[in-house]
Image (cartoon, grey):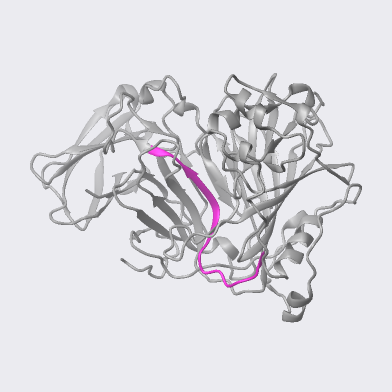
């Protein structure tokens, strides 16, 4: 394993961590909940307070609610030892349901909470079942007052033919809720907009899109030899929108062995839907591997990676690559893979501008899948620290989005339901036990972010080279900047680096396609006896880079 090195302020370099963890990391941050002012602060919780804190009770019906309610609950939880909730009390009939039968259970349209109101949002409580066994308390907040959501069997129906078995398994008594689904108005139509269910996972879509990438509210020790710790939803409070065009605000209480947390999510549907997130984290234990802005998506095979794909479809994936805009403004595109062995890459940075798992391919012919529209899956782009509209940290500090690394996990998979590609921000500094931090970011669910005037990477293909063990790569860049107004290709210089391994001399060439404003770079890699090679490619003209930086890790 190559251990992590000190991160450069402006360089995003891939680090091979395919066999173990890197140095521990974490951060501090000023309070952002409710628009409080920013500055450098860490609240060390007194040991006596931690020992004496009583278990917090969730608000009773009719209790007042404010933006401080859930952070106060998180502090109360974090000041006492962790106590897991039972998950073995789900009725067997529900727990043993097949996925299709469970997902066929839907709330009747007339029973949707707030259905038909001017704001256009409707809430659907999801019962526990299948492998969703965590009990999540659901509350509505109306006019500043808490109202618990109550289970009523008669409000549910078999939303599909396979849902009949699910309906038969529903008990008369309350089985508990596992989360919620939200419908929203997009223009003149309504569609499923968001789902909060399972550990602390949630998903949003833009207008006309299908669910794909999953967001993760918090991540602890992913792909770590010590084992991953999964924070879990404990309660969700949904505020009734106050205006027809207002956002939907959800307050989430999260609990885990190492920490408790409160999230405030402000959701707005649109062509690209947004989630503005502010969070308060209260640590019970020292945390040396924290993931922020986490996300995951399936990648089974694609044009540059068809390993083991005996499949009539052309491609199967919900995200084709990791996009990064680092602190120095460099635009990076890293195609993702379904590798033979676990691959962990860290792109060191200081003050990243954004990152995300991106679905660039929007043509059905890319996938040739008549059952699942992969081309309609949303991209998920995270903009650190911009959610609160204030500067991170204090003087000389960038808070949680300072030094650290965008981390990419690529996990071997043999099924498209496996979300085997994971990305998150890992801050550099470790966080001791008994501390409170605040963090903010904005998520864009929908189209991909702009790369400005730069040419984008629009294709990556790989195959056998001219001789064993050489590999041929075809990388397409598309953008007007590559051509003159008359359609001629501008003078280009290729920046192409392999380490280790070598680029085959004389095998690199450009293929210009003016009609599509595309330049293809073809080159051959000779990996020799190496088992992993990092590749870096960009195009320049007159010393100025005019394309994204293409990064790739080749493995056999």
Does the stretch in magenta take in 288?
Answer: yes
Residue at the limit of the structure toward the front, as seen here = 92
Q: Which residues are magenta?
A: 282-299
Q: Is residue 88 left or right of residue 489?
A: right
Against 404, residue 242 (above or below) is: above
In this view, 517 is above or below 232: above
Query: Residue 61, image x and y in percent?
Result: 89, 47
* Residue 23 visible here: yes
Q: Is residue 451 visible?
A: no
Q: Main secondary structure of the magenta part?
A: strand
How far across and how far down the image is residue 550, in percent? 33, 45
User: Residue lying farthest right?
Assistant: 62
Q: Quadrant of residue 528?
A: bottom left
Q: Farthest residue in the left direction?
A: 467
Up-down: is 547 above or below 263?
Answer: above
Q: Residue at x 32, y 21 (%)?
A: 515
- Front residue of this view, candidates 526 and 213: 213
Query: As drawn, is 451 to the left or to the right of 250?
Result: left
Residue 345 within the magenta-colored segment of the rendering: no
Depth check: 117 or 231 in front?
231
Question: Residue 9: where, in percent of width, then height?
Answer: 45, 64
- Where residue 430 appears, as percent x and y from the top left, is 53, 71
- With 315 as the anchor, is 396 left or right in this view? right
Residue 55, image quadrant: bottom right
- Give the quadrant of residue 58: bottom right
């Amino acid at each position: 394993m190559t251990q992590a090195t000190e991160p450069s302020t402006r360089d995003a370099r891939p680090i091979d961590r395919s066999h173990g963890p890197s140095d521990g990391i974490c951060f501090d941050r000023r309070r952002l909940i409710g628009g409080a002012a920013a500055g450098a602060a860490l609240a060390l919780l007194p040991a006596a307070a931690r020992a004496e804190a009583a278990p917090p009770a969730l608000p009773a019906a009719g209790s007042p609610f404010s933006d401080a309610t859930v952070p106060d609950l998180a502090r109360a939880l974090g000041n006492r030892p962790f106590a897991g909730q039972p998950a073995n009390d789900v009725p067997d009939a529900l727990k043993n349901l097949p996925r299709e039968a469970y997902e066929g259970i839907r709330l009747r349209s007339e029973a949707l909470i707030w259905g038909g109101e001017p704001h256009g949002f409707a809430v659907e409580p999801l019962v526990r079942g299948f492998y969703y066994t965590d009990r999540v308390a659901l509350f509505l907040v109306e006019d500043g007052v808490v109202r618990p959501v109550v289970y009523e069997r008669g409000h549910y129906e078999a939303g599909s033919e396979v849902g009949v078995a699910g309906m038969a398994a529903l008990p008369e008594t309350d089985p508990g809720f596992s989360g919620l689904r939200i419908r929203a108005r997009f223009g003149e139509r309504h569609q499923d907009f968001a789902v909060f269910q399972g550990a602390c996972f949630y998903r949003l879509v833009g207008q006309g899109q299908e669910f794909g990438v999953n967001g993760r509210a918090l991540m602890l020790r992913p792909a770590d030899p010590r084992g991953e710790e999964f924070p879990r939803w404990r309660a969700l409070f949904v505020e009734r929108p106050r205006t027809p065009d207002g956002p939907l605000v959800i307050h989430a209480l999260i609990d885990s062995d190492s920490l408790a947390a409160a999230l405030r999510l402000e959701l707005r549907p649109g062509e690209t839907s947004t989630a503005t997130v502010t969070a308060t984290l209260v640590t019970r234990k020292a945390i040396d591997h924290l993931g922020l802005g986490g996300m995951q998506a399936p990648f089974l095979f694609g044009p540059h990676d068809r390993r083991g794909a005996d499949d009539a479809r052309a491609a199967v994936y919900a995200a084709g690559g990791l996009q990064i805009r680092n602190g120095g403004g460099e635009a990076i595109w890293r195609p993702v893979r379904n590798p033979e062995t676990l691959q962990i890459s860290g792109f060191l940075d200081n003050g990243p501008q954004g990152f995300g798992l991106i679905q660039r391919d929007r043509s059905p012919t890319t996938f040739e899948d008549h059952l699942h529209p992969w081309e309609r899956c949303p991209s998920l782009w995270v903009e650190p620290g911009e959610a609160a509209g204030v500067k991170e940290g204090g003087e000389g500090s960038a808070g949680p989005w300072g030094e650290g690394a965008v981390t990419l996990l690529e996990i071997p998979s043999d099924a498209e339901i496996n979300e085997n590609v994971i990305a998150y921000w890992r801050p550099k500094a470790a966080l001791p036990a008994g501390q409170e931090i605040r963090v903010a970011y904005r998520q864009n669910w929908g189209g991909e972010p702009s790369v400005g005037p730069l040419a984008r990477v629009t294709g990556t293909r790989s195959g056998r080279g001219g001789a064993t063990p050489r590999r041929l790569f075809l990388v397409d860049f598309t953008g007007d900047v590559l051509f003159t107004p008359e359609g001629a290709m501008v003078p280009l210089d290729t920046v192409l680096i392999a380490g280790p391994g070598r680029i085959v001399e004389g095998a690199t060439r450009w293929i210009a396609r003016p009609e599509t404003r595309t330049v293809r770079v073809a080159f051959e890699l000779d990996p020799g006896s190496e088992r992993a090679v990092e590749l870096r490619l960009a195009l320049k003209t007159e010393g100025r880079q005019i394309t994204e930086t293409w990064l790739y890790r080749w493995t056999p």
